[in-house]
Image (cartoon, rainbow, N blue to C red):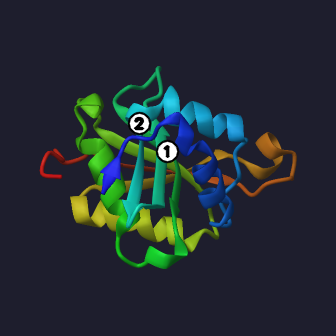
Amino acid sequence: MFRKPVATDGPVISGLIAACPPLDPNSAYCNLLQCTDFADSCIIAERAGAVVGWVSGYRPPAAPENFFVWQVAVSSAVRGQRLGGRMIEALLARPEQSGVAYLTTTVTEDNRASWGLFEGLAHRWNATLEKTARFEREAHFAGAHDTEWQARIGPLPTLTHI
């Protein structure tokens, strides 16, 4: 079952993200804000009453035609079932995402699981995936984090069938 998050989901989301390296852990407060102020652009997957998946995102105010996927976390118990992709499609099918033409995200070069997810979505949607450096190791992270590569997929199909 997919649903919008609520404030009381914050601690569970923090735990799921912590159990999904190499995801960057957010502060508990950040996760609470995502579960409340950004609930329309986040989604939870539940199975047998347990949270097994999370996608957070937003529409950048300066580029509302884009939907930026911030994090995708899937419990190890349910990996390999296309849950991440199905959550993203369900998010994009919401009325709140009307007018979205491109999906964007950033991923480090070595995160094969994330690249597989986004390359798979581009293929499934018959859309182009463009890859460009967005936040560079030295210029933006002072050498403390690998370069984040932007993936931009689109134009997107209409996802109303979810």
User: Label 2 neighbourhood size at 10 Å, few (<14), some (14-19), many (20+)?
Assistant: many
**First reached walking from the N terminus: tag 2 or tag 1:** 2
Of residues 139 and 103, the one nearer the viewer is 103
- Residue 154 appears in the figure: no
As drawn, the residue found furthest toward the front would be: 49
Helix, strand or loop status at disc 1: strand
In the rendered image of this protein, does residue 136 appear above or below residue 126?
A: above
> Where does residue 25 sit, x and y in percent of width and height?
71, 52
Helix, strand or loop status at disc 2: helix
> Where does residue 154 sit, x and y in percent of width and height?
30, 47
Tell me what residue is drawn at x 65 percent, y 51 percent.
14
Residue that numbered label 2 is attached to: 41
In the rendered image of this protein, does residue 158 appear above or below residue 40?
A: below
As drawn, the residue found furthest toward the left would be: 161
Q: Amino acid at mark 2?
A: Ser
Tell me what residue is drawn at x 37 percent, y 66 percent.
83
Residue that numbered label 1 is attached to: 56
Q: Which mark is residue 129?
A: none
